[in-house]
Amino acid sequence: MSKQTDDFFKNVISHAKEYGFVFPSSEIYDGLSAVYDYGQLGSELKNNLKTYWWKAMVQLHENIVGIDAAIFMHPTTWKASGHVDGFNDPMIDNKDSKKRYRADQLIEDKIARYEADGKVEEAQQLQADLDAALNADDLSKLKALIEAHDIVCPISGTKNWTDVRQFNLMFSTQMGASAEDAETVYLRPETAQGIFVNFLNVQKSGRMKVPFGIAQIGKAFRNEVIARQFIMRMREFEQMELQFFVRPGTELDWYNQWKETRLKWHLAVGGDPAKYRFHDHVKLAHYANAAVDIEYDFPFGFKEVEGIHSRTDFDLSQHQKYSGKKIQYFDPEINQNYVPYVIETSIGLDRLFLTVLCNSFEEQDLSTADKQDSRSVLRFHPTLAPVKAAILPLTKKDGLPDKAREILNRLKIDHNVQYDEKDSIGKRYRRQDAIGTPFCITVDYQSLEDDTVTLRHRDSMEQERVAAADLEKIVADLVGWKNLLGGL
Ligand code: ATP
């Protein structure tokens, strides 16, 4: 990360804390590593992002329905899905610093250093060796690479390493009243399995016809070996997933359609298109026949925000095998029974939140020849903004607060709006800019005479005079969902 992007990222994180978007979890006890709480504005923004996804996926598609499955699932689910045996990261500990690392990431950091030093051949060779070791699940080879390339612990500076071990990322706990009959259950590491195990329930109760989709938003938990970069890699996070069930043989067409649909959805939020790209997976998971990530150019580089996977019939077939229940669909058009194929779109809500913060945050220099001035602004899409409008009486007296509150009471039924009468109007505008409020409504002395108010626009800072009686319609038009969903 260059100094400039590093500073930008630090500013985003401190701004998010200062204005009530994201706090470290249980901060009074010094926080819990890689766990975060969303504050009063963060939870509003997060809810709006969820609504955007839900409306775009469920409400706009006749053949997609949404569910809300439990976080705990029967433990056999995770045997069938492959997570008990295969959801591992290779980890290594440094005996001096007692710090734990992902072995593959230590090696990747070394590759990046070779590249930065212009040692192209060394970088390419190490990358090839790393890929070979990972493909072969060869843990001793990973350790040998760490030793051969003199990789030291960033904390202790020593090469005093333990062996590389596999580390399962699932959190487990005990369910049951007494120790004897307690059963080990897992906190789900992905929401997808809650959809697969409900395939028949939803298909039958909803009379769904292939192709159709089941969508879900919910928490997922992974005991990440190392967690870093703020809400990028968390131990408790939220996913928004769609499993779209199709006739075998048609899956790659659907896969390509969903790629385009999802990229368009990201771009509609208003970010710079150059900051998004597809990244095709070269090495596919054993169950996938195509996979791509949508990556966003974070201050620390392009990283995955959403994965789109053509998962074949792997998941449903596995559940069929482990449960002993027939999980099939009778397709009346071709008069055949089959296990549907699946296209998955899986986006991390917290990573999406971070893209929106990074896209929106700006420190603007507003200085003129005779006055220094600046503002911090979050240029959220108005439909997603946590607070849609602030209602501000110019002064605290002469009936202006009463008039402002009357407007507030009308608008608050449909929108999250704020009332603020403290400090100068200029300061109040800056406060609203800093939390991304797209519109400020100011009640002044003229308002008492002709029932008009000023409407100030966050991005242009322009003001216009509008009739107070029209405000419900004006605000509804400016922040309505059609502004986001209409173009999809
Ligand atoms: P990564 O390679 O970054 O670990 P992944 O490939 O394991 O991610 P998936 O299993 O495909 O991720 O999960 C789908 C989405 O869930 C990801 O695109 C990401 O947005 C989100 N996600 C996964 N792990 C985390 C995490 N630890 N914290 C926050 N979001 C996550």
Image: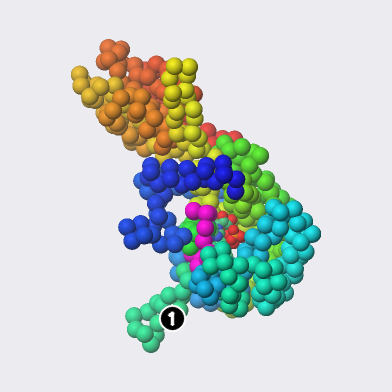
User: From the viewer's perspective, is residue 392 above or below residue 109?
Assistant: above
* Residue type for callout 1: Glu
Residue 300 is situated, as x and y percent measured from the top left of the image, at 59, 49
Q: Nearer the viewer, residue 218 or 103?
A: 103
Residue 224 highlighted magenta (yes or no): yes
Q: Nearer the viewer, residue 42 or 78?
A: 42
Quadrant of residue 286 within the rendered picture? bottom right
State left or right for residue 186 relative to residue 316: left
User: From the viewer's perspective, is residue 477 above or below residue 266?
Assistant: above
State left or right for residue 407 relative to residue 101: left
Q: Which residues are magenta?
A: 221-232
| Most common secondary structure along the magenta stretch | loop
Q: Nearer the viewer, residue 114 or 455?
A: 114
Residue 457 is situated, as x and y percent measured from the top left of the image, at 45, 25
User: From the viewer's perspective, is residue 46 above or below residue 420?
Assistant: below
Residue under the image location 79 percent in, 59 percent down? 121
Give the farthest residue toward the left.
398
Mark 1 burial class by Cα count in 10 Å: few <14, some 14-19, many 20+: some
Q: Quadrant of the C terminus?
A: top right
CB at disc 1 and ligand 1 closer than 8 Å = no
Residue 140 is situated, as x and y percent measured from the top left of the image, at 67, 78
Residue under the image location 65 percent in, 53 percent down? 293
Residue 417 is situated, as x and y percent measured from the top left of the image, at 35, 34
Give the farthest residue toward the right.
121
Q: Quadrant of ligand 1?
A: bottom right
- Scheme of colours in the image: rainbow
- Numbered circles on residues, count: 1
User: From the viewer's perspective, is residue 446 above or below residue 187?
Assistant: above
Q: Which residue is mark 1?
A: 183
Q: Is residue 278 visible?
A: yes
